[in-house]
Amino acid sequence: MDNPSIPESIIVGCTQLEIVEGYQQLQDLYWSENFKNWIFRFSINVSGVDERSIPHTTNWYMLIDPLYPRGSIGIYPDKVNSITQTYQHMNENKMVEHFPWRLGKICTDWDNGQLELLSDTEEQMDSDQRISWHVERLKKWVLAASNNSLVNSGDYFELPHLYYDGEQFIAFAEEQKHLIQWSGMKIRSGLVSLKEIPEYKNTLFVSDFYDRKSNVIQTYSWGKLIGASVEPILHYGVWVLLPFLPISHPWTYPKTIKELEAICKKHHFDIWREIYGHMHVFREQEQQNYLLIGFQIPQLVGGINAIVHWISIEIAKLTKKVNKITGFRRANDFYFQRDRINHLHPEKSLRYVRTENWSKESVLSRGSLNEKVHHDSVFLIGAGALGSAIGELLSRTGISKIIVCDNDILKVGNLSRHTLGINHLSMNKAEALSHRINYNNVHTWSGAINSAFPNLSEDEVDILESQDVIIDTTGSDAVVDYLYSFDWTLPKRFVSVSLGFGAKRMFVFLSNKHPFPAQSFYNFLRPWIELEREENKDIILPRDGIGCYHPLFPARSDDIWMMAGLAIKEIEAWWLQPFGPNIFAVYEQQHLEGLPAGVLLKQREVF
């Protein structure tokens, strides 16, 4: 784009800046091909600012999306005469050579907490108001930042922002139960193992924490893909749990070893005395070395601590071992002196590695089944179109263990409505679906039985008997009969989900009775089957190829997945009552003048 004309909407928006008190334009608006934004430079003068932290007048850059008044607006500190520190509600205020501004983008559109209380209005999206609204918000932010009042008690707690070099990533899985365990320990440091899984490129999974005697004192319960990986590469790092936040004023992590030492010293914590004895691994292993620093954080500012958070620093390989050491009583003293000259020099910059909490609570924070059912295990009979959809939904909504049982293989005709893909053709459906389920959730443990129920080996029967809920999705009378006649040694909870012709109807049978009440199932279902036959008696079913092949069951994938989602909702309500009633429910799609009109509950029997 060569010298494009300025959009009228942006001209109108910038005109309104003339009436903003304290605003002064320093550079005309221009188009940046590199940043794909309209940019201008300006200053603001804010009265009431505490000049001990921020000057009255500061310079800024504004980046405006070409889709204005839609799109993003970013405000960044100038490299000249602006703020140099990092505060709350802003990105790390880093200086990068090829940018004319610092990278500390201000969260002027922050929609929660103190800054929201300081503003009289929500973000304006009109072309004449939006730019000036952001500048007014910037003024309020500067004033609050200078007075150390950007956050108040009750605001959501936020960690300092960091920019990271490289793609390396470390996942941990801290939950509230771990905080209770950590709080009961006197041990503050040790070694930590991290798993590198071939399927997760550039990601390390924190596995076990060790004390000084190499005893495991804390561990995470990852799913099968991580916990039972056949070819993991183990890394060992050092962990330390601090009794304080390693955060410098106003709101940033330490940038150098010297700053880290200063924070620890302020809290009377000798960081090297605590961890250096463990750092021998940093001179022994060839892989990258990591120091994990943990600390407790609250959910709300001023609230009680809710979880342990971990940050990670990459440490270079330390001084090599030598055969003979003279002049030092202890070898550690020799190595420490050498390391302080080189890799642990006080002025050495800290290289942070991205970390993130992948606990089950965090992974499922956008929506899950009730936590009370998360730890129940499922034996899923049938890995066809309906079974794969239900297995997929169960794994993504929190069920920790799913065993899939089916002896069929995936054919090309299955792809039109199955969750599996071309890469799974000719594979056993149960094995392929189980593999996919393990990829859906890092906390799911799924296995496969490549046999038709109930033709199971003794070991497979043991697996079946150890599951809590049996879900049949085959629509097979034979399976229903076997569920009744099978020699169960322990009581089970049973679910049967089947679809009518074209997935117009869904039949859900939920039972807490032992054994499976097959006769009740048939009594409820029989009238509906007769209705289905009558409605579809003149329809010629499609067939799987030319010749004497069996007719295909017609139903589109959108119908199957919709009904599968509805089945999960019906099952969840029943699942929460382990000693509750048995249920038979029929759902039916509705259409009005050829258009979809929802799904109607046609029958529900509680017995």
Image: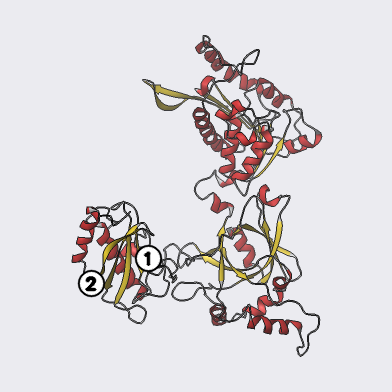
Direction from residue 6 to residue 157 in the image, left or right? right
State how far apart marks 1 and 2 are (Cα).
18 Å
Q: Position of residue 463 (x, y in %)?
A: 74, 38
| Closest to the observer, 212 or 199 | 199
Q: Which mark is residue 441?
A: none
- Residue at the disc numbered 2: 22
| Closest to the observer, 347 or 298 | 347
Q: Position of residue 377 (x, y in %)?
A: 66, 41
User: In the picture shown, does residue 152 fall above or below 346?
Assistant: above
| Residue 283 position by quadrant | bottom right
Residue drawn at 53 percent across, 65 percent down: 165
| Closest to the observer, 362 or 525 | 362
Q: Residue furthest bottom?
A: 327
Around disc 1, counting alpha carbons within 10 Å, would you say few (fewer than 14), some (14 to 19), or many (20 or more)?
many
Q: Which mark is residue 106?
A: 1
User: In the picture shown, does residue 532 fall above or below 291?
Assistant: above
The three-letter code of the residue at mark 2 reads: Gly
Q: How is the image coloured?
A: secondary structure
Q: Residue furthest front?
A: 2
Around disc 2, counting alpha carbons within 10 Å, would you say few (fewer than 14), some (14 to 19), or many (20 or more)?
some
Q: Of helix, strand and loop, which one carries label 2? A: loop
Q: Position of residue 438 (x, y in %)?
A: 64, 44
The three-letter code of the residue at mark 1 reads: Ile
| Residue 488 position by quadrant | top right
